[in-house]
């Protein structure tokens, strides 16, 4: 009984760390992350080439 309880407590303690590690791989793309010569296209939700004149 004590072993099962200890294993359950350890699993619950590690849960936040594992979930944060899982989510940290996602990178949000925003206007500030567009490369030079590109701008944020709100309708597409991505960076697009900026037309030059």
Image (cartoon, rainbow, N blue to C red):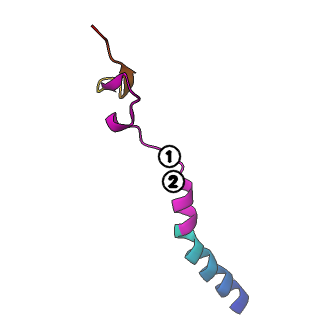
State the residue in front, 16 or 30: 30
Distance (Cα) linking label 1 and label 2? 6 Å
Q: Residues within 10 Å of mark 1 (few under 14, many from 20)?
A: few
Q: Position of residue 15 (x, y in %)?
A: 56, 69
Q: Position of residue 30 (x, y in %)?
A: 35, 37
The span shown in magenta is: 17-40
Give the secondary structure at mark 1. Answer: loop
Residue at image point 34% right, 37% down: 32
Residue at image point 32% right, 25% down: 39
Could you tell me if residue 1 is visible in this image?
no
Indicate whether 51 appears above or below 22: above
Image marks 1 and 2: residues in contact by CB distance under 8 Å = yes
State the residue in front, 39 or 22: 39
Give the secondary structure at mark 2. Answer: helix
Q: Is residue 34 magenta?
A: yes
> Which residue ends up furthest to the top in the rendered image?
53
> Which residue ends up furthest to the bottom in the rendered image?
2
Indicate whether 25 appears above or below 7: above
Q: Position of residue 52 (x, y in %)?
A: 30, 11
Residue 37 sits in quarter: top left
Query: Image quadrant for the C terminus?
Result: top left
Query: What residue is shown with label 2?
Result: 23
Query: Image quadrant for the N terminus?
Result: bottom right
Q: How many marks?
A: 2
Query: What residue is shown with label 1?
Result: 26
Q: Is residue 27 left or right of residue 45?
A: right
Residue at image point 68% right, 81% down: 7
Q: Residues within 10 Å of mark 2 (few under 14, many from 20)?
A: few
């Amino acid at each position: 009984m004590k072993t099962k309880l200890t294993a359950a407590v350890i699993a619950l303690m590690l849960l936040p760390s594992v979930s944060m590690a899982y989510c940290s791989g996602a990178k949000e793309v925003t206007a500030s992350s567009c490369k030079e010569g590109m701008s944020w296209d709100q309708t597409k939700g991505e960076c697009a080439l900026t037309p030059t004149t």
